[in-house]
Image (spheres, grey):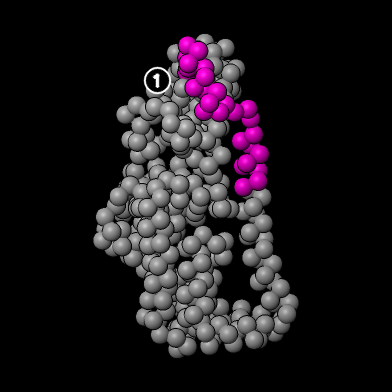
Amino acid sequence: MSYLLQLIEQYGLIIVFFNVLLSQLGVPLPAYPTLIITGALASGGEYSTTLLMLTAVGAALIADYGWYLAGKRYGRKVMGMLCRISLSPDSCVRQTEAIYARWGAPSLLVAKFVPGFASIASALAGTIGTRRPTFLLFDGVGAALWAGLAIYLGSRFSATIDQLLLLLEELGETGLAVILAGIAVFVVGKWWQRKRFMKSLSMARISVAELDQLLQQGIKPAIVDVRTPVAQQRGWIPGAVVTSIQQINTFTLDVTADQEIIVYCACPNEASAAIVAKQLIQRGYKKVRPLTGGIDAWIAAGYPVET
């Protein structure tokens, strides 16, 4: 443990850079504890506070700009990939789109304070065409606010943090084990949360080929689009009606309880569609199925969309 603390004192800025970079790239490795500890060390003269701030902001901007460019080039695919590798629930795309649609680029000012939002918001900014200077301005200010608060907390409670570091040093290997156990508990907790969420989405689905076959046969199921307004601008499956998870309790379908209802979204594992489908089943509709792959699978198969 003593060796670890010496590394933090000697190479703190390098550790901060790579910790923040990996964290903003989506690795489940919290950067705030590192920033708070190095903020405490900076208040004691170990580092330059300005250099510490620039290091953290620079690392965050590199990661975020990488996601911005990925979103600009690959569109929504990169956001879907982010949600698949994330330890947060798969509704992250829908939530991020809703926040970004309401506030636009200024939402990046608080993005890093919202778990699971920063990386996807950066990719979304590139996807919907947010201007590069605008993105860099708001993302940079947001990174400064995020890192600055951690550094301030470190300096404000430097005495307490110094005592904690001394205690961990006295504990030796036990102290290191406590730190590693804390990180493990965080990761396992997120993994368990995701596993429970995935289990809750388990239900029968319909493929895009099956839906097209129904339409070709003249069978017209009720088709419900539960994407955000931003996503719906790209077009929708012909005949679909539009709603959202927030509106589903007041949403009325002009169908009988026995009629087929197909719900689709544009999110990994059909998360939003499955949630809405289960809510419709609870309201008495008997034949409700999410569309496997959502609108992206429909478009990839070459089927038409309306705008």
Q: Tell me where residue 222 appears, x and y as whole percent.
A: 47, 18
Residue depicted at x 55% and y 23%:
210
Image point 64% across, 65% down: which residue? 183
Q: Name the residue that disc number 1 marks.
A: 239
- State the extent of the magenta-drawn residues as a range: 194-222
- Dot 1, crowdedness within 10 Å: few (<14), some or many (≥20)? some
How many marks overall?
A: 1
Quadrant for the C terminus in the image: top left
Camera-nearest residue between 44 and 133: 133
Rendered position, 306 above or below 145: above
Q: Where does residue 105 sit, x and y in percent of width and height?
A: 31, 53
Residue 19 seen in the current view: yes
Q: Position of residue 36 (x, y in %)?
A: 50, 73
Amino acid carrying label 1: it is Gly
Q: Residue furthest front?
A: 302
Q: Secondary structure at mark 1?
A: loop
Residue drawn at point x = 45 percent, y = 47 percent: 77
Question: Can residue 204 be found in the magenta stretch?
Answer: yes
Residue 300: image x %, image y %?
Answer: 45, 36
Q: Residue shown at 47%/81% (left/top)?
A: 13
